[in-house]
Structures are given as structure tokens and as C-alpha cells.
């Protein structure tokens, strides 16, 4: 059944819909803008005949009844209702209803790469990836697998980093429900392509790692010399590069697929800008976890990585480019183009809590969240400390106690002072403090 402007459709719970216009299409069906009797606008995904199976219809109905909760769950543009034809002769066709996304605000990676939307700052990109990791963790924790993670299904606000995840009709119960879609070639795990394994939460982890690599590098992790030497980019070629003989382009032990092609200069620049922590996590995903799914970085590992990166972003004083400091960096120099200037570090704090030990740069308006105390994704917005200026002497900086507990600070002369709520510890290297929930030391 072909939908055209003015076509009337039925829903189970929301009355009648009217098709306004076609928005696009894909392998499973076409997408349309529609409005209801109250003139509220929605998006309808209408399946092609061969995709409109009873199994798919049941899957959509199950998803409608099992909405994910919390902020992480709300990022999924979940199916809202089943949509059917009003014409009894077309009962084999159906689709589903979802919320309309504000495309003036939210973009895909392709929109940014083409220049249609602005590039997010490095700090904002960290937030985008952290939120995506948080949402997929909630999905997996609920017993589902996504089965088609790709850049085309992740939308984000490049200004503030808010995230939406769309095209969720292929979500299914992990290792139980079948899917009509195995994924997108570039993002599929080797075992899915080779049919030695089915889509699962573990194959999602491979796809998620590819997505993050694409977000940071604008390049595929397996597109190097082996890929550039192939003349015909057909199915056998993709099988070879993505599944049969995949080699990470920055594999520290195997240079067979190193990206030497001049067209790949950009990925070298972006790789140089990555801190050691991110490089190590990518290497774990595409070397250790490539053929050993259980060794792939989990969502919480990615989340921790991006949160720590976000809290250690600092601008180069020479050119203004954003850089990411990492405790594993011995010489901190700007990555941007021909700058290469050394970046002087502001004071840092070494935090030791039940979560572990973290090193954070302390710059203007830096915030330490309760996440560093408990390691919980949900505690990221709860502040326990913030860098502030002394109102009487703006040249003096301190770390303000935002908790309701009194801290104990050990000064340079060994004396212990109380730091009441809303008071601050001076950012003087060597000062140590006890927050009750953990300990800190100022370094410079």
C-alpha cells in the first residue's frame, strides 16, 4: 500500500491520523509526517509488504507496553502506537507511530560532517557519548538488545549535548526474540556478519565502539591500507574488512591496516588529539574484544571514560583549541594543526573514594559531582564541590564544599582546619582534605 498526502490511517489508542508528507525511506519501509484530529504532529514508519510480518507487529506491540523509565530511558524515541490502514483490502500493511524530532535542534553525525549543523565542542562530544553509553546500558540492563546501533540512529543537540536514539523498532529481548534486521554493515560485529552468532548485547557493544570511533575520528576503525587497496567495494570486500580479516587501523601490534593513504590524514590528527585513556579503550574494543566479545568495553567503562575526559578539557592559551588532559600524558602539548605549544596545567585534585582514584583539572567553574564518590551514572548532576574565586581577593582560588558535611583540611604546616559547607579549600599544591566520602589532595 502506497501512502500519499491525505491518506487516512487508524491507530489503536490515538484515533485517526492523516498523512501530511513523506520524509524518507530505508530498507524496512518509509517514514511520513502525519497529524491527528487535534493537529498534533507525529512520525509514522510504514513497513514494506515483506517487512510487515506478524512477528514484527507483535514486537512493536510489546515495545509499546514496555517503555524505559528515567532520563536515560527517555532518550529512546520508543514506538507509541501501531498504525494500520483504514482500507480493509490492505490489512496486511501496518506501521508504528513515534514522536516528531526537532531537526532544527537535533542532528546526525552526517549533518555535522557535511557542515549542515555545527560541530559540537570536545566537552559537548564527551557528554553526547556519555549519555549514549548511559542509555544503552539501561536498555541492556532491562534485558533488551538494540541490534542496529549506528550513527544514523543517534541524534544529538550539538550545542548542549542532549541525545535522542531513534529507529527502535528492532529492539528485542536479548538472545530470545528474532529480528528482521541484523544491523548496518559498517557497525556489525564480525560474528554477526559471519553468522557464527546472533545480534545480542555483546554484539551491540561492538557496534557501540564503532559508533564512538566514528563520532571522534569521523573514520571507520577498519578503513586503512587493506580497505583502500580494494577496487570494488562489494559484499565480499566488506566481509573481508569487517569480519574475515578485520585489523584495527591503530593496532599497536599489527600495522597491516595502518592508514597511510593521504586521504586519511584527518584520522591521524584526530587520533593524536585523543587522550591515552580513550586510545586504550578503543584498542581494547578493536583488538582484545574483536574476536572475544566478552572482552569488549562495557557501557559503564565508556561512560567513565567520557565523564573523566569531559572534566579534563582545557583550552590551549596560544590558539584556543580544546585539549584533553590525562594523567598518562607526560608532556601536555596542543594537538591543533601547527600549534604544538606546551599547555601549562592549572592545579589538579587527586580524589580517592570508594569508586577509585581520579585525577581532575581544577579550572574556572570546574565541578566535582557525586559520581566520583559512588560511581553511579545517576549521580552525575549532584555536585559535591566547585572551583570558586575568593570574593575579597579574586586572585585566590578555592574548592568550595557543596555538601552538608564539614570537611577536614590538612594545611602545608600540618595544621588541620575545618571546612564548613559553602567554605573552600585553597587550591594550594600539597593541601590534603577529607570529605568524609573520600579524600583529596591538591597538586600543581
Image: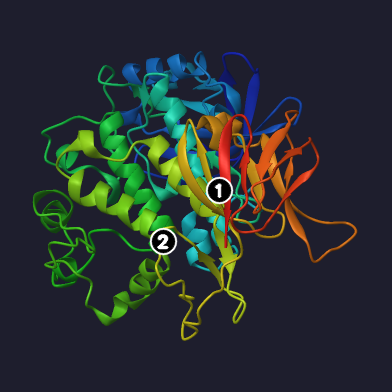
In space, the residues marked 2 and 1 are separated at their CA atoms by 16 Å
Give the colour scheme shown: rainbow
Q: Is mark 2 on a helix, strand or loop?
A: loop
- Residue, x 63% and y 56% (percent of image)? 362
Residue identifier under label 2:
275
- Residue, x 48% and y 46% (percent of image)? 358
Q: Is residue 96 visible?
A: yes
Q: For residue 127, which numbered disc appears in the image?
A: 1
For this rendering, which residue is in front, 61 or 68?
Answer: 68
Image coordinates for residue 354, horizontal then vertical, percent:
48, 30
- Horizontal side, residue 410 vs residue 323: left or right: right
Q: Residues within 10 Å of mark 2 (few under 14, many from 20)?
A: some
Image coordinates for residue 300, horizontal then vertical, percent:
42, 35
- Residue, x 62% and y 77% (percent of image)? 317
Q: For the residues carrying marks 2 and 1, which lies nearer the camera in this image?
A: 2
For this rendering, which residue is in front, 191 or 341?
Answer: 341
- N-terminal of the pair, mark 2 or mark 1, is 1
- Residue, x 21% and y 58% (percent of image)? 248
Q: In this view, does 7 lie above or below 106?
A: above
Q: What element carries label 1?
A: helix
Q: Is residue 327 above or below residue 167?
A: below
Q: Residues within 10 Å of mark 1 (few under 14, many from 20)?
A: many
For this rendering, which residue is in front, 166 or 308?
Answer: 308
Image coordinates for residue 88, horizontal then vertical, percent:
47, 16
Q: In this view, does 297 lie above or below 387?
A: above
Q: How many marks?
A: 2
Q: In which quarter of the image is the N terminus?
A: top left
Image coordinates for residue 413, horizontal then vertical, percent:
66, 52
Q: In which quarter of the image is the C terminus?
A: bottom right
- Horizontal side, residue 48 vs residue 13: left or right: left
Q: Can residue 1 be seen in this view?
A: no
Amino acid at each position: 500500500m502506497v501512502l500519499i498526502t491525505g491518506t487516512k490511517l487508524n491507530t489503536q489508542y490515538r484515533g485517526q491520523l492523516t498523512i501530511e508528507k513523506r520524509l524518507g525511506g530505508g530498507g524496512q519501509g518509509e517514514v511520513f509526517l502525519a497529524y491527528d484530529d487535534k493537529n498534533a504532529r507525529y512520525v509514522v514508519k510504514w513497513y514494506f509488504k515483506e517487512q510487515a510480518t506478524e512477528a514484527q507487529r507483535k514486537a512493536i506491540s510489546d515495545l509499546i507496553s514496555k517503555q524505559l523509565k528515567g532520563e536515560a530511558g527517555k532518550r529512546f524515541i520508543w514506538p507509541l502506537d501501531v498504525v494500520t490502514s483504514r482500507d480493509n483490502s490492505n490489512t496486511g500493511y501496518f506501521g508504528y507511530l513515534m514522536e516528531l524530532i526537532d531537526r532544527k535542534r537535533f542532528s546526525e553525525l552526517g549533518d555535522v560532517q557535511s557542515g549542515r549543523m555545527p560541530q559540537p565542542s570536545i566537552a559537548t562530544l564527551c557528554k553526547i557519548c556519555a549519555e549514549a553509553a548511559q542509555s544503552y546500558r539501561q536498555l541492556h540492563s532491562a534485558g533488551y538488545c538494540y541490534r542496529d546501533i549506528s550513527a544514523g540512529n543517534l541524534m544529538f543537540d550539538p550545542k548542549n549535548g542532549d541525545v535522542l536514539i531513534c529507529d527502535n523498532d528492532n529492539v528485542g529481548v536479548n538472545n530470545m526474540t528474532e529480528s528482521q534486521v541484523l544491523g548496518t554493515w559498517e557497525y556489525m560485529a564480525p560474528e554477526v556478519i559471519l553468522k557464527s552468532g546472533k545480534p545480542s548485547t555483546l554484539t551491540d557493544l561492538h557496534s557501540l565502539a564503532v559508533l564512538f570511533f566514528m563520532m571522534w575520528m569521523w573514520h571507520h576503525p577498519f578503513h586503512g591500507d587493506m580497505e583502500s587497496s580494494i577496487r570494488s567495494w562489494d559484499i565480499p570486500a566488506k566481509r573481508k574488512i569487517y569480519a574475515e580479516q578485520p585489523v584495527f587501523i591503530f593496532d599497536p601490534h599489527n600495522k597491516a591496516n595502518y592508514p597511510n593513504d593521504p586521504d586519511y590524514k584527518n584520522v591521524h590528527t584526530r587520533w593524536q588529539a585523543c587522550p591515552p585513556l580513550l586510545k586504550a579503550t578503543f584498542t581494547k574494543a578493536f583488538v582484545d574484544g574483536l574476536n572475544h566479545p566478552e572482552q569488549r568495553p562495557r557501557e559503564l567503562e565508556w561512560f567513565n571514560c567520557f565523564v573523566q575526559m569531559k572534566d579534563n578539557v582545557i583550552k590551549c592559551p596560544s590558539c584556543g583549541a580544546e585539549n584533553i588532559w590525562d594523567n598518562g600524558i607526560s608532556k601536555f602539548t596542543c594537538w591543533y594543526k601547527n600549534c604544538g605549544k606546551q599547555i601549562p596545567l592549572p592545579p589538579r585534585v587527586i580524589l580517592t573514594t570508594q569508586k577509585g582514584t581520579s585525577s581532575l583539572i581544577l579550572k574556572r567553574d570546574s565541578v566535582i559531582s557525586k559520581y566520583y564518590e559512588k560511581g553511579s551514572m545517576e549521580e552525575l548532576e549532584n555536585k559535591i564541590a566547585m572551583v570558586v574565586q575568593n570574593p575579597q581577593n579574586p586572585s585566590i582560588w578555592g574548592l568550595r564544599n557543596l555538601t552538608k558535611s564539614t570537611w577536614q583540611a590538612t594545611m602545608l604546616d600540618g595544621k588541620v582546619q575545618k571546612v564548613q559547607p559553602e567554605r573552600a579549600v585553597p587550591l594550594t599544591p600539597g593541601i590534603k582534605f577529607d570529605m568524609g566520602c573520600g579524600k583529596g589532595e591538591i597538586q600543581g
